Image (cartoon, rainbow, N blue to C red):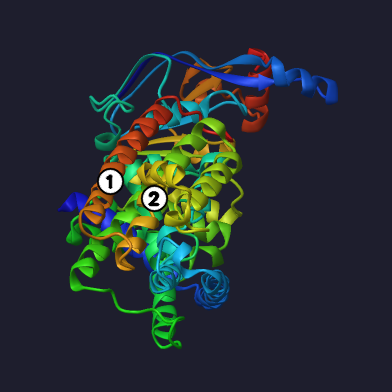
Amino acid sequence: MIQVEHLRKTFRVAKRSAGFGNAVKALFHREYDEIHALDDIFFRIEDGEAVGYIGPNGAGKSSTIKILSGILTPDSGTCLVDGRIPWKDRKTHVAKIGVVFGQRSQLWWDVPVIDSFELIRDIYAVPESDYKRNLRDLTDLLDLSELLKTPTRSLSLGQRMRCEIAASLLHDPRILFLDEPTIGLDAVSKLAVREFILDMNRTRGTTVILTTHDMQDIEALAQRVILIGKGRILLDGTLDDIRRGGEQIDETLAALYRQFDI
Amino acid sequence: MQKIKKYISFFRLRFTMGLQYRAAAAAGVATQFAWGALHILAFHAFYRTDPSAFPMTIEATVNYIWLQQAFLAIFAPWITDNDIFEAIRSGSVSYELCRPVSLYTMWFTRNLSLRFSRVVLRCFPILLVALFLPDGYRLTLPQDLHSFLLFLPSLFLGAFVAASLLVIVYAATFFTLAPQGLRAVVTAASEFLSGFVIPLPFFPDSLRRICEALPFAAIGSTPLRIYSGDLAGQAAYTAFGLQIFWLIALVLCGQLLMRRALRNVTLQGG
């Protein structure tokens, strides 16, 4: 279970106006803007739920995921994931969760995928029998058999993303955080990824928290949607709650963004 | 054991990755030969003028230079993992923080594996050829077994000290975001102060004494001087002790800095 209360995070961003004069001025006096990435965030996610976490760029989605996965320390507020405070017991915490950042890679670039997998096995100390079983299942479900011996650098984005997702699941995490897992994927890869995540959620009961800009991801995967904008939770409900009759989901969302002025 | 296994597997992967770069290794061997020969010829010219004015014998100096070239990758301050700097700049470091491992130990291991994978490919051809060069230019065997037995652990300690120094540079990059400045300072300082350009005994006495106490001497200077017999007896043990001291001090410093960095970390790039 994930419980988040009063979570706040502020970043300081250095700013200056264009031009040489201002650059010189910034040498002596630097101006900062405070960005409230998260401003009093609340939510609660039960075991086995699949939740879509949506909002425009810069709304605070990634910051939330990073705090939940123990990478970032918030300024204030509490957050408990299965009773753990992520940033306090980072090492114990991350051993039990899986994270996929769609825009980054966790596989080692110059070696075959299987080498990365085996390293991950050792890093998480996955017992050999569990590792073999997981690898077999993941290879079947994500259709990886052709890819395992290929160096990561030679994979297409869609192939790589399937391997990335497999890599995040080798240690049987109870919770899976997916930060834009379908970004840049073609239709076939998107469908494969979605189908797989749905299957993990339904059959293994893995809790899934997914951020995305692709509303079809949400339609396919999430029973519940949390909308965040300017660091605040604006809506927490089912997809039907935000959908109005007959409209395309993207239009609904755009209307919603306009309504909340985010 | 489970705990150490993570880092060993990591070391193994990086090590095998490093072994792929054969062309780089061949080029490295050639460079090191040219560089070593140049140094030795220059020193010979000086010795011919007045051998008594020199703090090390020509044999010791030649040994120092050949070993330095053979084990360059172990000591070289410029051997850094650019992936790490890039990961900090771009924010991919997120993934490394999602692992149940200590980031410090991981990066330390990474730096070490880089050094050892490079040195394994390069040291043997250099050592082998250097052993069979004409008299006066040749790498000779150590004076006694004792100094050789002290040389080996000292060599490894040198690599560890070098790695611990660089993890501090990695951790500092969390604050500065641009690694170039700090890296340039550390590289230049440690190249000169560790006796890379000129062995420390050639320094003026007062400067030499300061340099010998600094962590940089613990990297390359100490093992090479032990092998060549320039540091022997009590002096060798003192220098060896200093290596251990600096390793502990730098590791503690690095861990402290890393902990601070991670507490205040801002991940770049969304």
Q: Is A11 situated above or below B154?
A: above
User: Marks 2 and 1, how far apart in space?
Assistant: 9 Å
What crowding class fits label 1: few (fewer than 14 Cα within 10 Å), some (14-19), or many (20 or more)? some
Residue B79 coordinates in the image, percent (x, y) = 49, 56
Which residue type carries mark 2? Answer: Ala
Answer whether residue B270 is visible to the viewer in this image. yes
Q: Which residue is mark 2?
A: B217
Which residue type carries mark 1? Answer: Leu
Left or right, residue A178 beside residue B230: right
Q: Quadrant of residue A224?
A: top left
Q: Is A247 situated above or below A202?
A: above
Residue A157 coordinates in the image, percent (x, y) = 57, 57
Quadrant in which the C terminus of chain A appears: top right
Whether pointer 2 and pointer 1 mark residues with C-beta atoms closer than 8 Å, the reply is: yes
Q: Which residue is mark 1?
A: B242
Q: Nearer the viewer, residue B238 or A103?
A: B238
Answer whether residue A148 is visible to the viewer in this image. no
Q: Are marks 2 and 1 on the same chain?
A: yes
The residue positioned 44% from the left and 31% from the top of the image is: A66
- N-terminal-most mark, 2 or 1: 2
The residue positioned 34% from the left and 48% from the top of the image is: B106
Residue B113 coordinates in the image, percent (x, y) = 37, 60
